[in-house]
Image (cartoon, grey):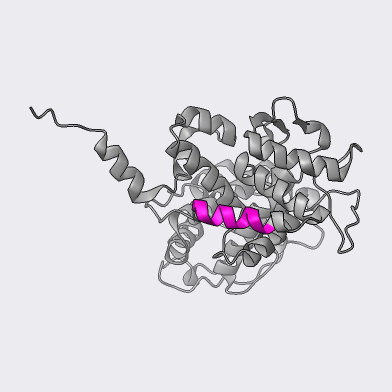
Amino acid sequence: MPEPEKLDTETIVPASATMELVRVELPPSLPLDQNPAAIYLASLRPVGRRGMRRALTAIVETIKGESSDPLDFPWHTLRFQHTQALRAKLAERYRPATVNHMLSALRGVLSQAENLGLISADDFRRTTKIKSIRGESLPKGRALIPTELTLLVRVCQKDNSPKGIRDLAMVAVLYGAGLRRSEVVKLDLKDFDLKDNSLKVRSGKGGKDRVTYLGQRSGEALGEWIKARGEEVGPLFLPVTKTGKLLRRRLSDQAVLWILAQRGKEAGLEHFSPHDMRRTFISDLLDAGADIATVQKLAGHASVTTTARYDRRGEVAKQKAAELIKLPFD
């Protein structure tokens, strides 16, 4: 195998230097099944694939100073000095959690490069010897307060069309069960059991299935949508045209984002995302006294540490907790 073309290390070794590398394209004859980035991305689930592709694109942009397709970048030519300087530059631009996410993507691609024989085991070990960035950032997103939820529900209730009934049911599932929007669009009619208001969430994050439950009111809202939708098998949530016609196909997760944004504007709310509904679900359960292990299972998290990061109760929760400690005065 010919020696890979060397990168211009003069511009990348100093952490403060600009991250411009000599543009070296992968050999034109190299097929996708020999491309480490392509193989790494193909090994991921669709949701994870999009995120990791964005991470790799950001890495390439940081290195080259311009946007470029990560499949065209010669990952196998990176060495220890390059990845160390890259880590330093990424730390200047992004939050610790984002940098660590990007470094994880980089390790994944370099691992495939080793598997393909494009780099040696020693070079792989040295090149991926990258310490994670330590530090804490302010938590992402926010939780909605009860007044905001009330306004959001009322906006949907005022719309008596199939679209309004659907959107109320969607709010009920996003907040009442804390589902991710990618999980909402995967739901089929058969996944909801009206008898116990249970929802079967299939192929959630990490490919895991789970059963979660809706409260009585959320279950009723979803039941009303099913009456409007009909009992035909298929996706639970359907697109609705301006004339109120239901289209028998699955919504996209981007459609969920757009629907919620539109309803939020109608309700006069500050910007929030579907994932903020999930944060609110977790925070409200914890505030109501549910133990964190149960909340973890309902949310489909791998660990309680992840669940704790979603807690948006803030200073009020700390004050309430402090009041639980009673000094034994006479």
Judge from the rendering whether residue 277 lies leftward or rightward of residue 27; answer left or right.
Answer: left
Residue 293 within the segment the image draws in magenta: no
* Residue located at (67% from left, 43% from top): 173
324 or 234: nearer the viewer: 324
Work out whether residue 60 can be spotted. Answer: yes
Judge from the rendering whether residue 92 lies leftward or rightward of residue 8; answer left or right.
Answer: left
Q: Position of residue 159 (x, y in %)?
A: 75, 58
Residue 150 within the segment the image draws in magenta: yes
* Residue located at (72% from left, 46% from top): 169
Name the residue furthest top: 195
Q: Position of residue 117 (x, y in %)?
A: 68, 44
**Which span is picked out in magenta?**
144-155
Q: Where is residue 45 in the image (x, y as percent from the top left)?
A: 71, 43
Query: Most prominent secondary structure in the magenta stretch?
Result: helix
On screen, residue 230 above or below 10: above
256 or 36: nearer the viewer: 256
